[in-house]
């Protein structure tokens, strides 16, 4: 069996001609087959089909970075939808890394970054991987043009509709929904409320750091005021807020409990959110800190549930 143009590596086989690498294949028989295909087609990668049959197997192929990649192998011919999904997945993560191309993580924030003409550009910050992958995938499919985003965009990977806003060339995912009947004004209000709560120390959203000094401008642009089911921010001063001062004096344990409370939050909900702090007398410690937060008029107990005190 001739191995011309095939170089054996530790765990793979590389197809090389005139110092140019055309493919890296795990299996020797597949490497010989791809080598023969290239020879028969004058080493023209443009002739590479998406599906090719090798004996009893159907190989799904992709050309990326001027190399042939075998994406999958089937006993029956796969449909075009399967091939398209495999191709997109490989394009987004050709090296099988943890997050795929252009996504890094710093603490709890996912960052989309791409180098263009030698300079690093950041396209967005996200508090969850799903949103970061959606934006990265969309940008890959649209030549990194942020202007291609609509206000409401369908994500085929999660079958959800995502409300998107591009601010200073950064792409923000405001929220996700199961159908496209979305109350945009409410979505905008809650997005602005997150920015406001992050600014005033009422909650932590590091991925919104760049927006805390432009809340009024965003309110004017979106045509709504920051608000959610608990908070209204009209009477919070930028420089002096008694509530802000109180929140900043909380202990880390008190602050974590405070952040865990939303509308009608049960004691069990709080326990689950605080599980990382579990220690001796765990429940009593939570109860004691809840009492402290009530005394400081930051939360209240209503019908057995806990809620943030409304402004």
Image: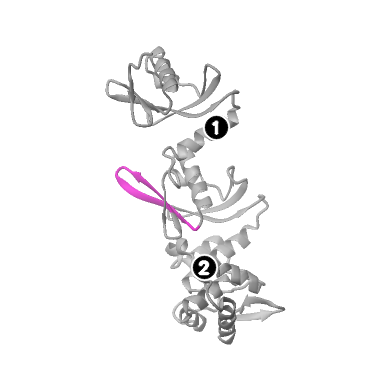
Q: Could you tell me how many numbered marks the image carries? A: 2
Q: Which residue is mark 1?
A: 84
Q: Decide: few, some or many residues near mark 2? Use Cα within 10 Å; few <14, some 14-19, many ≥20.
A: few
Q: Residue at x 53, y 16 (%)?
A: 55
**Callout in the foreground (2, 1):** 2
Residue 230: x %, y % from top left: 62, 73
> Which structural element holds mark 2?
helix
As drawn, the residue found furthest toward the right would be 303
Q: CA distance from mark 2 to mark 1?
A: 41 Å
- Circles 2 and 1, Cβ within 8 Å, touching? The answer is no
Q: Which portion, as a residue range, is magenta?
A: 111-127
Q: Which residue is mark 2?
A: 276
Q: Which mark is residue 250?
A: none
Quarter of the figure with the C terminus: bottom right
Q: Residue at x 66, y 80 (%)?
A: 301
Q: Nearer the viewer, residue 169 or 12?
A: 12
Sequence-first tag of 2 and 1: 1
Quarter of the figure with the N terminus: top left
> Which structural element holds mark 1?
helix
- Magenta stretch holds residue 63: no
Q: Quadrant of residue 227?
A: bottom right
Q: Decide: few, some or many residues near mark 1? Use Cα within 10 Å; few <14, some 14-19, many ≥20.
A: few
């Amino acid at each position: 069996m001739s191995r011309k143009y095939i170089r054996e590596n530790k765990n793979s086989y590389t197809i090389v001609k005139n110092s140019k690498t055309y493919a890296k294949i795990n299996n020797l028989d597949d490497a010989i087959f791809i080598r023969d295909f290239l020879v028969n087609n004058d080493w023209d990668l443009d002739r590479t089909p998406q599906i090719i049959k090798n004996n009893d197997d159907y190989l799904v192929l992709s050309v990326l970075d001027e190399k042939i990649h075998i994406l999958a192998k089937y006993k029956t011919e796969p449909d075009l939808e399967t091939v398209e999904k495999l191709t997109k997945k490989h394009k987004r993560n050709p090296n099988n890394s943890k997050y795929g191309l252009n996504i890094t993580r710093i603490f709890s924030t996912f960052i989309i970054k791409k180098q263009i003409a030698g300079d690093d550009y950041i396209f967005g910050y996200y508090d969850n991987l799903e949103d970061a992958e959606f934006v990265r995938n969309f940008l890959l499919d649209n030549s990194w043009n942020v202007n291609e985003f609509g206000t409401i965009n369908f994500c085929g990977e999660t079958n959800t509709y995502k409300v998107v806003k591009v601010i200073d060339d950064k792409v923000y995912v405001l929220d996700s929904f199961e159908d496209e009947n979305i109350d945009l004004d409410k979505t905008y209000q809650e997005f602005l409320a997150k920015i406001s709560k992050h600014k005033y120390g009422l909650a932590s959203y590091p991925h919104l750091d760049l927006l805390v000094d432009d809340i009024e401008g965003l309110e004017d642009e979106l045509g709504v005021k920051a608000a959610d089911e608990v908070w209204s921010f009209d009477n919070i001063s930028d420089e002096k807020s008694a509530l802000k001062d109180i929140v900043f004096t909380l202990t880390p344990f008190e602050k974590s409990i405070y952040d865990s409370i939303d509308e009608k939050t049960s004691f069990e909900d709080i326990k689950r959110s605080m599980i990382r702090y579990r220690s001796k007398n765990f429940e009593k410690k939570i109860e004691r800190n809840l009492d402290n937060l009530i005394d400081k008029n930051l939360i209240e107990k209503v019908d057995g549930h806990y809620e943030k005190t409304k402004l």
